[in-house]
Image (spheres, rainbow, N blue to C red):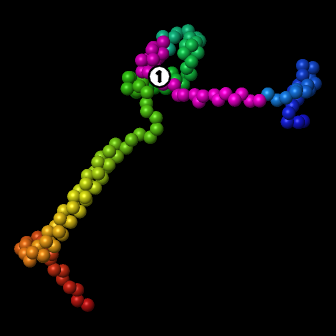
Amino acid sequence: MSHESHRRPGSNGTHAQTDTLTPPDPQVIPKAERRRFSAEYKQRILAEADACTERGQIGALLRREGLYSSHLDKWRTQRARGVLQALAPQKRGPKPDPQAAEIAQLRHENEQLRTRLQRAEHIIDVQKKLAELLGTLPPETPSSVAPSLPTLKR
């Protein structure tokens, strides 16, 4: 069998030879988007489904609306858990950490304080050097004098 043609069964069961293969359709099919249903729509459909009393009515409702029975199951569960809040569309993906914002704020504040400390230490060093150059050293305060460490005897 060649690449330019292929066999397919004819109406009498024999194989008929076709001239060429048909090229694939170059049209790109768009990717389907996830459907989103409003809380009002979900409530309306649930009310209609609850009102169905005869056999086959729920199936007809689902076909008419283009829904699956799993939609009804999920929406009923959501309705039982929390009425309107549960029926609102839920955001997908990982949930944000509630402490993440506080941690980020504290890290930012910590970085600002480190920067201020570095500036203050630099200013103090400049003041000390200036005092040395002028020959006037400020009187030492007890908090500025480092306690002498005891020496270890060996």
Q: Position of residue 130 (x, y in %)?
A: 13, 71
**Is residue 44 on the magenta stretch?**
yes
Above-or-below relation of 127 to 45 = below
Dominant secondary structure (helix, strand or loop) of the stretch shown in magenta? loop
Q: Position of residue 137 (x, y in %)?
A: 8, 75
Q: What is the quadrant of residue 144 in the picture? A: bottom left
Determine the residue positioned at 14% across, 77% down: 147
Q: On the rendered image, what quadrant is the C terminus found in? A: bottom left
The residue positioned farthest toward the top in the image shown:
54
Q: Is residue 80 visible?
A: no
Q: Which residues are magenta?
A: 23-48
Q: What is the quadrant of residue 22 in the picture? A: top right
The residue positioned farthest toward the front in the image shown:
134
Above-or-below relation of 54 to 2 = above
Above-or-below relation of 79 to 3 = above
Q: Position of residue 118 (x, y in %)?
A: 23, 62
140 left or right of 2 in image:
left
Above-or-below relation of 141 to 82 = below
Q: Which residue is mark 1?
A: 37
Determine the residue positioned at 45% across, 14% down: 44
Determine the residue positioned at 25% across, 59% down: 114
**Is residue 52 on the magenta stretch?**
no
Q: On the rendered image, what quadrant is the N terminus found in? A: top right
Amino acid type, residue under disc 1 in the picture: Phe
Badge 1 element: loop
Q: Position of residue 127 (x, y in %)?
A: 14, 69
Of residue 77 and residue 105, the one placed in the foreground of this image is: 105
Of residue 49 and residue 122, the one placed in the foreground of this image is: 122
Q: Is residue 119 visible?
A: yes
